[in-house]
Amino acid sequence: PASAAVIDRAHKAQSPTRPSVRGRLVIDSAMGAGFTDPDGNVFLDMSAGVAVSSVGRNHPKVVAAIREQCEKLMHSAGLVSETTVALAEKLNATMPAGLKDESFTWFGMSGSGAIETAIKFAKAITGRNQIVAFEGAYHGVFHGSLAVTTRENFRAQFGPLMPGTMHLPYPYCYRCFADLKHPECGSLCSKYARYKLTTPNTGADDVAAVIVESMQADGGYIDPPPEFLQTLREVCTAKGIILIIDEVQAGGGRTGKMWAHEHYGIVPDMMTWAKAIGGDLPLSGVTIHERFRDKLPLGSQVLTGAENALANVVAMANLDILTDPDDDLIGRAAVVGEELKAELREIAANSHFIDEVRGRGLFIGIELVSDKDKRTPLDAKRVGAILQKCESQGVRIMSCGRYGSTIRLMPPLTTTRAHLRAGIKAFANAVAEVEA
Ligand code: PMP
């Protein structure tokens, strides 16, 4: 078929480091939660790109914004464009109290780039060198963002990376490192982080930043217990450490709040964002508290391709769609997410493989295991077979997690209930077939 020919050409013409070069699916055109391949097969995308197309692909308001802007200006390279200013103002206004109207934004083109920038800024602001991150984190592929990422398959053969990083345990309570249950564990991850960040003569005095995903994404779609982020906030404030919250995947309304850290009642010093804000176009950024403005070296962080006017108007359209009170997509994500989790838990009760179902809004993690008592991660072969069986029913679903055995559901927030139910049905069918 035509898809196979495209994949064959990708193997020859593209770098083998790109995951989809190894993939099976080719995207040719798209609309909303659906896309078609070059053979005309139609797929439901339960992954919204990779949590990118939160308002659905090719939303009519986004297409109209591009059409209108492209005749006028696309690339502002080094000059001030009102579209960038307007987007910065709009974004800053979406921040929770404590950052709202007390922040400014730096713009980039990728999540990885936003993380690199936040790390540099934290070093400049504090004059310190160490960066603390968490096990299971994914923050990007460059020397700084990869250094704070713990995925060995991404790191192997590329070291030494940015020096001065330390990884502490993230509360992945389903697979607790101490084999304890929350809350009986007494929130060990929070206690350990407090200990590592406050004990003198252990390097704690040189920590510039703690970087943490509000809800861990690629590491397994994990919503941490509230005291974890609250402890980090408290310790960072006490020690003058910059708290960088990475909202690249969980942010933008998917979890039922505009920014996932709002569920935990904390305010970051810096926040990185990307994916859903740019949506159909590449865009990322770091939003920073106003009190750090004078600590940043003037004109020191520039990217030629950043501040693209097309990306700016698309992001503004995305924010308008997400925050439109009539559709209330963010509130709907919270409600629909609860419905989906309830349905999935019913399916799990009759399944050998499907165990914990967790998450908030349309950020849902599902543990696949071969033994529910021992919580043995389902092997890559059977996880792969399940995903392939979903695809042959026309549904794209992705996995994630330290063992590759967590299914993540992150469909566009605009996906109809009927389509979401169809997606889950395809997943349940696929699991049942592989179990048989
Ligand atoms: N941070 C998080 C939480 C992410 O999920 C990702 C991408 N998966 C990144 C950073 C890096 O983003 P990008 O791929 O756009 O560089």
Image (cartoon, rainbow, N blue to C red):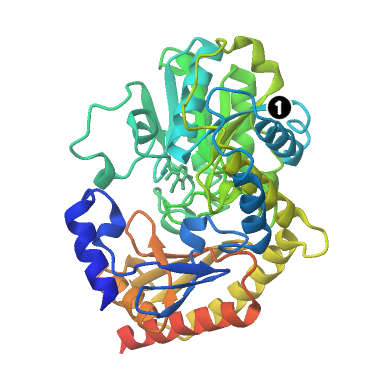
Q: Is residue 137 visible?
A: yes
Q: Residue 239 location, x and y as percent? A: 59, 18
The single residue placed furthest to the front in the displayed view is: 71
Q: Where is residue 116 in the image (x, y as percent from the top left)?
A: 44, 28
Instruction: Compare residues 196 and 207 and report the one nearer the observer.
Output: 207
Quadrant position of ligand 1: top left
Residue 402: x, y in percent?
A: 35, 53
Q: What residue type is labelled 1?
A: Ser
> Is there any visible trace of residue 221 in the rendered image?
no
Q: Residue at x 47, y 19 (%)?
A: 207
Q: Which residue lies furthest to the right in this view?
A: 326
Q: In which quarter of the image is residue 32?
A: bottom right
| Residue for point 33% across, 29% down | 143
Query: Which residue appears at 64% of the width and 24% of the height?
Result: 80
The quarter of the displayed image where residue 125 is located: top right
Q: In screen coordinates, is 50 left or right of 363?
A: left
Mark 1 lies on a secondary structure that is strand
Q: Name the residue under label 1.
A: 103
Q: Which of 179 and 77 is in front in this view?
A: 77
Question: Alpha-carbon neighbours of circle 1 within 10 Å: few (<14), some, or many (≥20)?
Answer: many
